[in-house]
Image (cartoon, rainbow, N blue to C red):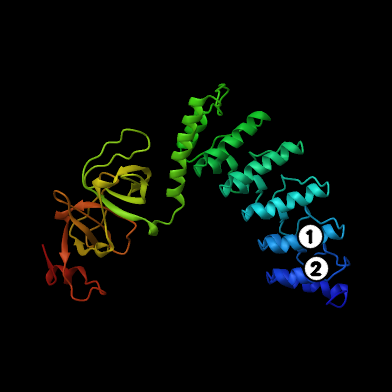
Amino acid sequence: MGLLNGKTSDIKLLFKAIENNDDKKVKAILSNDNGTLNINEKNKEGKYPLLLAVKKDNFEMVYSIIDYANKNHIRLTLEENNKTKEYPLVLAAKNNNMKIVNLLIDYANINNIILNVELKDAFFCYPFYYAAKNDNVEMARLFINYAEEKEIIMDINDQTEFSDNPLFRSINQYNAEITELILKYSKKYKLKTKIQCEEKNEVYNYSLFLGLLNEANNNINDKRKQKEKQKYIDFLNQKKRILKKDDKNYSEAVVLYDFKSSNLKELSVCKGDYIVVTDWNISDGWVFGYKINDPNVFGKIPRHIINRCYEDYVEGDLVSAIYDFKGNTPDELDFKKDEYLRVLDWNIKDGWVYGYINGNRQKKGIFPKLFIRRVYYENQNYLPSYEEAVNNKMTA
């Protein structure tokens, strides 16, 4: 029995090692056993070693278990769920772990097992859905190729408990490549597709362009089409960068001159606009970013027409609103009388300032200078009452 005494204690130690995410201990236990362990045994929760290892998202533990099974000619439990409807393949896809997904598929192929790629968890989510949700084009393509190789027709348009499906995810996450995979697969096997998206965005239009939402026979192998297709993908990849990157890593900038775009990739801006720059070197002399009040309006801008807003001025000057103000455009900031604000730029344009509601830097905009008065107060950690500010500590 190697370094352990008794089959029952061995499996308990294995469960404990997996629960502790100790891949070295798992490897030691399995390496020192001669094939007597019941590697498919379940614990009280109905979980078995392979399922637990996949759930821990630990490739080394999964590899050790599969290696043990192969060496000892043991057929692993791959598709038996536990009390919470968890399956190894579904969990691996959910965890976006391509290495474990490949490992499970390789094991199945070696042992002549056909995996059920349509298994669903407690939320009615299935492997292909998680591939789309995680923006994993490689994994989505792997599942489609596997299904076709095994002559399985996946219903990749099934809705989950969240009332969405892979197509909804791919369109709203601006993933043109997965959208194309889904629509081509659905068309090939005559599966019904329901286009549901929050808005008819660029990926929706991209799908129309490829002729995948109707019966039009577009030849996407044509060189011109391929070139246009690549432009769309490049454009959408920029969009995804905006949606996924943490705003705190971006830099704000103010526009110094008007600029009118000449193509889809450029962003039209006006003097006084504020933008968030996500890439200061997108190409020679150009930056990439979006309008501060609308991340959906984005593109390239000439570097020389903007000026970075440095952290020295980020707090702004404290002011108090003397009237209610309701903006007429998305760039204008709404506020109520007596609210405190911070002014970042006193001369954004004639009669207007730029700033934010005190304590909420994410909500910025322009507002009339006549609607505010500057607060001069000795203790900036304490905000005076409106009466204190008006009577003692404020000048026009």
Q: Which residue shows up at 71% across the image and 59% down it?
A: 84
Q: Is residue 387 left or right of residue 171?
A: left
Residue located beneath label 2 in the image: 30
**Mark 1: few/some/many CA within 10 Å (<14, 14-19, 20+):** some
> Which quadrant of the figure has residue 238?
top left
Q: Which residue shows up at 83% across the image and 77% down it?
A: 3
Is residue 47 in view from this perspective?
Answer: no
Image location (x, y in percent) of residue 36: 89, 67
Q: Which residue shows up at 83% across the image and 64% down it?
A: 41
Residue located beneath label 1 in the image: 67
Mark 2: amino acid? Leu
Mark 1: amino acid? Asp
What SS does tag 1 mark? Answer: helix
Image location (x, y in percent) of residue 318: 21, 65
Image location (x, y in percent) of residue 288: 36, 46
Is residue 167 in view from this perspective?
Answer: yes
